[in-house]
Amino acid sequence: ETILTQSPATLSLSPGERATLSCRASQNVSNYLAWYQQKPGQAPRLLIYDASNRATGIPARFSGGGSGTDFTLTISSLEPEDFAVYYCQQRNMWTFGQGTKVEVK
Amino acid sequence: QVQLVESGGGVVQPGRSLRLSCAASGFTFRFYGMHWVRQAPGKGLEWITLISYDGRNQYYADSVRGRSSISRDNSKNKLYLLIDSLTAKDTAVYYCAKDFAHYESIGYFDFWGRGTLVTVSS
């Protein structure tokens, strides 16, 4: 079973700052990794698939990178609506990381 | 637009079973694999099951394998999840989610319902 470990658990930043979230896989998942955003009381939303492809309607400030075991989600300049929890997910056995909360500093 | 609406949640006693439904609209349901993902209160996301577009193949997480069954009715655009022998660990919001690709399920979830809360309690 591939385990996804996200870091940090919480990221405290101000609007306009750059956010860099990490997801590490316990074994090689190639580029088969997605990122989701979840706001309180809402369902998750697909942001990035296959490590670096933005899903339909996702703003360009969201970008994904990495392959193999190390992946990043970058938000170039945080907007107020970006403060949320972010999950990575690998498609081979559909498992999720434990999440990173991006909160207002 | 794509809509997924779950129903069937509520309070259920330990040891009982529960059947959840998901009504789909806004896309050609019979072309897509469908998943159930759950989220315990204050916790992260847990994928639990997938059914292929034609219903022939099902996959389950260890946490529900052997006591749950996913099914679909492509004539009614509906997805179902039956879970037996419920315990407090099954308390969660249950989401149905559409697979990203048609026919072959590639395992990304591009549309989600709003979820239905299942509370297992005596």
Image (cartoon, coloured by chain):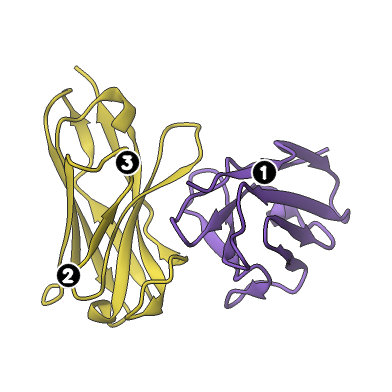
Chain colours: A purple, B yellow
What is the x, y in percent for residue B39?
42, 40
- Asked if the residues shown at circle 3 and circle 2 are in contact, with their CB atoms under 8 angstroms apart, the answer is no
The residue at the far top in this view is B122
Kindly state the secondary structure of the residue where label 1 is placed.
strand
Same-subunit check for callouts 3 and 1: no
Specify the amino acid type for callout 3: Asp
Which residue matches tag 1?
Answer: A6
Tell me what residue is drawn at x 64 percent, y 42 percent: A5
Kindly state the secondary structure of the residue where label 2 is placed.
loop
Would you say B75 lies left or right of B34 here?
A: left
Label annotation for residue B56: 2
**Whether residue B47 is visible:** yes
Tell me what residue is drawn at x 53 percent, y 48 percent: A2
- The alpha-carbon separation of the residues under discs 2 and 1 comes to 34 Å
Question: Which callout, 2 or 1, points to the residue nearer the camera?
Answer: 2
Same-subunit check for callouts 3 and 2: yes
**Does B64 sit above or below residue A90?**
above
**Does A91 sit above or below residue B43?**
below
- Mark 2: give few (<14), some (14-19) or many (20+) Cα within 10 Å: few
- The alpha-carbon separation of the residues under discs 3 and 1 comes to 22 Å
Specify the amino acid type for callout 1: Gln
Would you say B109 lies left or right of A80 here?
A: left
What is the x, y in percent for residue A53?
65, 75
Same-subunit check for callouts 2 and 1: no
Subunit bearing disc 3 = B
Tell me what residue is drawn at x 68 percent, y 49 percent: A24
The residue at the far front in this view is A27
Specify the amino acid type for callout 2: Arg
Question: Which callout, 3 or 1, points to the residue nearer the camera?
Answer: 3
Which residue matches tag 3?
Answer: B62
Q: How many marks?
A: 3
